[in-house]
Amino acid sequence: MISIRVPLTEARDASYDVIVGRAIWDRLPQLLSERCPAHRYAVVTDSRVGALYGARLLALLEAAGFAARSFLFPAGEWNKVRSTWADLCDQMLGAGIGRDAAVVALGGGVAGDLAGFVAATLHRGIPYVHVPTTVLAMIDSSIGGKTGVDLPAGKNLVGAIHAPRFTLADIETLTTLPRNQIAAGCAEAIKHGVIADAAYADDLGRAAAACLARSLAALEQVVEGSIRIKSEIVASDVLEHGRRQVLNFGHTVGHAVEACSRYTLLHGEAIAIGMAVEASLAEAAGLAQSGLRRRLLDLLDQFELPAAVPDTLTCDDLLGAMRSDKKARAGAIRFALPAAIGTMAHSADGAWTVEVGSNDIRSALEANR
Ligand SMILES: NC(=O)c1ccc[n+]([C@@H]2O[C@H](COP(=O)([O-])OP(=O)(O)OC[C@H]3O[C@@H](n4cnc5c(N)ncnc54)[C@H](O)[C@@H]3O)[C@@H](O)[C@H]2O)c1
Ligand SMILES: [Zn+2]
């Protein structure tokens, strides 16, 4: 046997800035030339966002003298799959997109995850930037560099970590986002308040009506606050060994609700229900101050988000889905649970999740019907 060392330089620092503001689209060409120079830009977006903003973005890039072309895929989570990834790669290769090109991911989390995965894999990786247009994409999916597609066996099972060069979140794009999509994105903002910042959670309660009415000032505050919280948590645990698990609050139950309802609920709506159930678990386990769940339910209500587990979903089906979730290890179901609004429970040895038995999970599900 011989062993030969392959000298690879250390992974480069993949830190990047998320630039947030109102009416800041016009800065894109300058930012691209400084932080993501390329000979051509491939704008990847879904059919809906493409119809709303595609032409404007291309015109902006062309006016700045860049060669750019857009590549569309049909809107909807069910298109975040391998065949769409393959179609986009084929189209881009057919159009001569080479190693010297970069991708602009324009749209919600689906466009970001798909375009990011194309960028991570085409020519073994080309640079990309995010231009998110949903609340969820601005505060959640465009932070952390996770890209990928869904498989029949589950969501996001094939993907890559590929950090964008920067993210440009222009709050004005949210003026066309439907009300239920605004609310669903804000479910992740509520999560950020619960896991890390009680004052931010209070601000959210006060801003709820204005956000739903698409006040740009209110949305800007919420988006900025959430980006700060998520990026701070991601930075504190880049390798995902510990604290980053708190971002999973509401998601163990929420993913099961999402899957068992066959994706008829929006992700944020399923997470809202998941947070309510997991708050019950935290109170029942004596980890959380009593009253935490009540406060959470008030916040969900202010954003017109659901909190009740649908009667059509049985405990057996939900438990089965939780066990098959990729985060469940060796059959045990673990949860990141809050101790108070703004503070997550963690053990002295640094564990951020606790194991909860099936009977306690059943009781929490039934308590939230
Ligand atoms: N990579 C990550 O770390 C991460 C984190 C969280 C979620 N995600 C992924 O994000 C996805 C969900 O993202 P999403 O909620 O943004 O869904 P989405 O991208 O499907 O967008 C929701 C809908 O809104 C439309 N839309 C987008 N922007 C619009 C605008 N400004 N005006 C009008 N319509 C607009 C889209 O066309 C789509 O129909 C999921 O696939 C999820 O797995 C990824
Ligand atoms: Zn989520």
Image: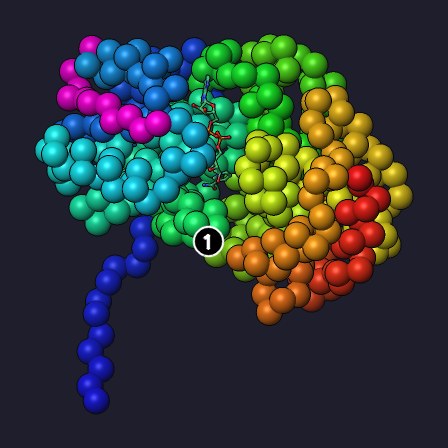
Residue 144 vertical position relative to residue 12 in the rendered view, above or below: above
* Image coords of residue 177 (percent x, y): 51, 16
Residue 71 lies in the magenta-colored region: yes
Visible residue check, residue 202:
no
Q: Nearer the viewer, residue 134 or 9?
A: 134
Residue in view at x 59 percent, y 12 percent: 214
Residue in view at x 56 percent, y 40 percent: 262
Left/right of residue 30 with respect to residue 150 in the rendered view:
left
* Image coords of residue 310 (percent x, y): 72, 37
Left/right of residue 254 with respect to residue 98 in the rendered view:
right
Other-residue count near label 1 (Cα within 10 Å), few / some / many at <14 / 14–19 / ≥20: few
Residue 47 vertical position relative to residue 128 in the rendered view, above or below: above
Left/right of residue 281 with respect to residue 145 in the rendered view:
right
**Which stretch did the figure color magenta?**
63-74
Residue 61 lies in the magenta-colored region: no
Quadrant containing the N terminus is bottom left
**To which quarter of the image does residue 297 belong?**
top right
Q: Nearer the viewer, residue 172 or 357?
A: 357
* Image coords of residue 25 (percent x, y): 37, 15
**To which quarter of the image does residue 343 belong?**
top right
Q: Nearer the viewer, residue 98 or 11?
A: 98
Residue in view at x 39 percent, y 26 percent: 75
Most distant residue in the right direction: 290
Residue in view at x 63 percent, y 16 percent: 211
Determine the secondary structure under disc 1: loop
Left/right of residue 297 with respect to residue 85 in the rendered view:
right
Visible residue check, residue 89:
yes
The residue beneath circle 1 is 153
Quadrant containing the C terminus is top right
> Which amino acid type corresponds to the residue marked 1 in the rendered image?
Ala
Q: How is the image coloured?
A: rainbow
